[in-house]
Amino acid sequence: MTRISSANPHRPDPVLTIDTAFFWAAADEGRFVAQQCGGCATLWHPPRPVCPKCLSKEKHAHDLSGRGTVMSWIMPVHPPAHGFDAPPIVVLVETEEGLRFVSNVEGIDPRQMKNGLKVEVAFARTKGGHQVPIFVPAEEI
């Protein structure tokens, strides 16, 4: 799961907050994670200070499979997307664990994009040398 996409010297760095720092630190290590409750074992994303189910403050990072399905996608054309030379493919991906992430898909011709596309996580470098999770078409097994 540590595939790295082609370098984009303009991709913006992630914005770290007290709640998201663990997620971005894991991405820099090539790991795709979500929060998991220490009380009821619920997984959630986006990161927040308490479990959305039981309100426990006990939480830890849980490694995700990195596999998912495109639920929806769009290519913003105007205005141009900041940090991209060409319009990126923006997707809503539902992971095998049932969590949803907004990200980009790379490595596919936009004419081949479709809802239901199977994808897997990869990591893209940012202009500051960090990594952010993106998705690529899943390899057939």
Image: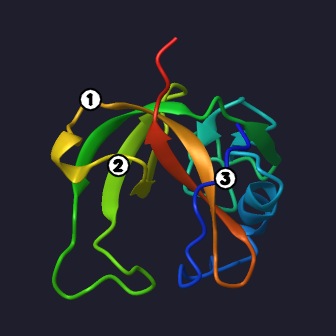
Residue hosting label 3: 4
Residue 60 x/y as whole percent: 82, 45
Residue 108 x/y as whole percent: 34, 46
SS for callout 2: strand
Separation of residues labelled 2 and 1 (CA atoms): 11 Å
Residue hosting label 1: 116
Give the foreground label among 1 and 3: 3
Picture residue at 26% right of the left edge, 86% below the top? 80
Indicate the quadrant where residue 94 lies: top left
Residue hosting label 2: 92
SS for callout 3: loop
Picture residue at 72% right of the left edge, 29% below the top? 41
Crowd around label 3: few <14 · some 14–19 · many ≥20 (10 Å): some
Task: Determine contact: label 2, label 3, CB under 8 Å.
Answer: no
Crowd around label 1: few <14 · some 14–19 · many ≥20 (10 Å): few
Mark sitting earlier along the chain (2/1): 2
